[in-house]
Image (spheres, rainbow, N blue to C red):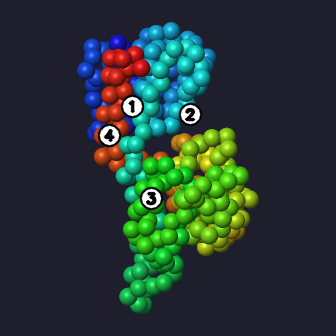
Amino acid sequence: MKIVFLDSTAIPKHIPIPRPNFEHQWVEYEHTSPEQTIERAKDADIVITSKVVFDRETMKQLPNLKLIAITATGTNNVDLEAAKELGIAVKNVTGYSSVTVPEHVLGLIFALKHSLMNWYKDQLSAKWADSKQFCYFDYPITDVKGSTLGVVGKGNLGKEIGRLAEALGMKVIYAERKGATTVREGYLPFEQVLQEADIVTLHCPLTPETTNLINAETLKLMKPTAYLINTGRGPLVDEKALAEALENGTIAAAALDVLVKEPLEKDNPLIQAATRLPNLIITPHVAWASDGAVEILVKKVTQNMEEFVATGK
């Protein structure tokens, strides 16, 4: 079996993927552009990738390809219908980030509620040294305890962040799907959650129905004191609408680990806003990437390959 890893820098270098237990040839590339995909994968039986795109036309030109092993949960980069028609198996990995993503969300909540980024930035200047008092009060500090957390998406991650939030004394409410005609037990209508929550955190899958779920209209439903956190998928949020909402005070703050296009473009409206707004935190899609989570991920990628070779499934 020839295995080609097309974008190895999607995994931290200090945590390599374990080699599978069947006989194989291993070829690895740090990055692969769309123009390089076919040439590099043309003789592969198995490709490993995080974000390299496999559309129908690409896969039709890879007659040896039997398995696409994805080093992530999302499969948006693969045309799954075409893969099935062409007899190419696709295996992703789930459940590896059930600790690290909720912890990242909590970190973002504390950073926003306690204005930690603003206090830190001040220490890069002489502001505290020039103060005539032992402290100063330029930025708001509010308690996490007693806040209402609105969770959009009640899968493993949504439920775990809810559990942790309740342990901190937060009230947790879960949003029903937008536009749903009935509201399931344990949920509240989507619009009601936006209206009541002090913090809204997104953990739902990206589908045609959830694309731009948070937009100019839905942002206006939120409290002017509310925060938005997105560690789910970038396109869940209309970035231009969010930038405008932060600029004009429609909502108080936002913290994002994912953007529509990654890596972000320099003219992205949110990164432009982040240079002048104290109420926006952006991290580079690393909420999933604790060492513990990555170790689980790479082991499951190898298991996926071994199971496929052993069973054909």
Disc 4, disc 1: CB below 8 Å? no
Q: Where residue 278 sits: x, y (%)?
A: 55, 68
Identify residue for label 2. 76
Disc 2, disc 4: CB below 8 Å? no
Q: Where residue 82 sits: x, y (%)?
A: 59, 20
Q: Residue furthest left?
A: 21
Marks 2, 1: nearer the viewer:
2
Could one spot residue 58 in this view of the protein?
no
Could one spot residue 61 in this view of the protein?
yes
Identify residue for label 3. 161
Badge 2 or badge 1: first in the primary sequence:
1
Residue 8 disc label:
1
Alpha carbon distance from label 1 to label 3: 30 Å
Whether residue 53 is situated above or below residue 120 in the rendered picture: above
Q: Where residue 66 sits: x, y (%)?
A: 45, 15
Badge 2 or badge 4: first in the primary sequence:
2
The quadrant in which residue 183 appears is: bottom right
Question: How many residues crowd around disc 2 within 10 Å: few (fewer than 14), some, or many (20 or more)?
Answer: few
Marks 4, 1: nearer the viewer:
4
Badge 1 or badge 3: first in the primary sequence:
1
